[in-house]
Image: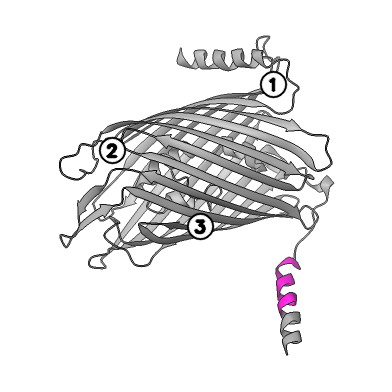
Amino acid sequence: MKKKAYILAISLMGLPFSGCETIKPYEKEYLLNPLMDDTFVSSLTPEFALSSTARYEKLASGAQGAVGSTSCPTCGG
Amino acid sequence: MAIRSHILIVLTLSGFLKYQTAQGHNIHQQMSVYSDSRGIDRNRLKLDGGLKFNHSSSLLTSSTFDISATRDSTFDPNVESPAEGEEIAQRTQNHAATVTLGQTWKKLTDTRVLGRVSGDENTRSQTFGGGLSHWFWGDSLQASLDVSRTRTQRPEIEVLDANSDVTVTPANYSSVGTVASLKHLATPTTITQYTVAHVEANDRPPADTYAFNVRQFIPPVGAAVHGTVARAFNRGRVTTESTYGQVDAWIYEVALLKTFFKKTHARLAWREYREEEDTRVDGNQYFTGTDLVTVNLAQEIPAKTIDSIRYPMLIEAGHSRYRTNAIDRDNTRVAAVSYELGVGARF
């Protein structure tokens, strides 16, 4: 019974990845475009506007860590 | 005049570095202004720079050192009164500095640590954090984990609640946060990212945020569409150490990015924030909604475009308009505008 549970758990863990496609290096041309690159997109992101308006949005400061504008979840707005 | 002097500062500093090996060092300066209908004005000057070194070691691929400093001046005529007998400044000037060290190991693993200090006439704050990322599954999946802790020393603010309870925000505030994300190179033109964040603070129940982001490149038009949906919760027992009740929110953003003439990049975005609050005292529900429309431009200037430009430069400009589309419990309606201008160089 325990063995079946382990097999089932491992199978379920692989489920999300069964549809994953491995992108070959030569296929990354568009993914490396500045419009898709984190470093360049950050120069086009209105970080100052978001930090200024966060005073009116109680959950915005903490959410910035999740919506990708910062990797520091407690740095705030 | 101010813009010309800032560009000259960047060019002069780039002259001192002309004998360094070109490994991706950069310097950047940005000026920003903000003004809203509640009388709040803010202006910020930010200077940051970074050094990047490539290594020949088989273990350590590259390392980075980034530092940024900001001077932030805010005038707020609506500041809450502190405890009786104390004054709190309406105009504050905040100075902040952030240092980030990053390393890339065997090309696939990134580690980073950051430290940040800031302070003004009323508050002091310190933040420390670190993070780890790794590419796997044929370099198509990147898992990241970042943790940070912030401590803030601030004056106690007393506010009378609806039932005449006195709420007092603690003078010593601390929070610990964790962000975990999974970035997936889903197709040759699509990147998706799944993110979960958890923040615990000493004056509020824990806050959780779940976000999904997708970036889709459209080759025929040389443009990209970015979309984000996030759901945030901050519910649980709220004590008199907090001035607002239980809240949850939806955040949506859609952005269109386009490159013109190979060197000019533009981003037009619309963001909506919808919040619902249940007050601590009587459980009344209040709704807040905001719209933020932003347009940002980045112009690449290759080296030698004109004789005085020795290194590639980037000039950025941005404008945003912000509106509240639903009134919160304080009957607040906000209209705001902001402008940003930046210049940077890469060596």
Residue name at image x 74 percent, y 66 percent: A17
Chain letter of mark 2 equals B
Q: Earlier in the sequence, mark 3 or mark 1?
A: 3
Q: Amino acid at mark 1?
A: Pro
Q: Amino acid at mark 2?
A: Ser
C-alpha span from label 3 to label 1: 37 Å
Circle 1 residue: B302
Considering the numbered disc 2 on the image, is that residue within a helix, a strand or a loop?
loop
Residue name at image x 74 percent, y 71 percent: A14
Q: Closer to the camera: disc 2 or disc 3?
A: 3
Considering the numbered disc 1 on the image, is that residue within a helix, a strand or a loop?
loop
Q: Amino acid at mark 3?
A: Ala
In this rendered view, identify the residue nearer to me: B136 or B36. B136
Which contiguous range is marked in magenta? A9-18
Considering the numbered disc 3 on the image, is that residue within a helix, a strand or a loop?
strand
Residue name at image x 71 percent, y 36 percent: B63
Q: Earlier in the sequence, mark 2 or mark 1?
A: 2
Tag 2 near tag 1, CB within 8 Å: no
Residue B122 lies left or right of residue B65; in this view the side is left
Query: Residue B238: percent from the left, percent from the top?
Result: 32, 63
Is any part of residue A22 visible from this angle?
A: yes
Residue name at image x 39 percent, y 43 percent: A53
Circle 2 residue: B37
Residues behind callouts 2 and 1 on a single chain: yes
Query: Residue B320: percent from the left, percent from the top?
Result: 44, 37
- Picture quarter containing residue B180? bottom right
Query: Residue B36: percent from the left, percent from the top?
Result: 32, 37
**Numbered circle sitting on residue B230:** 3
C-alpha span from label 2 to label 3: 27 Å
In this rendered view, identify the residue nearer to me: B44 or B173. B173
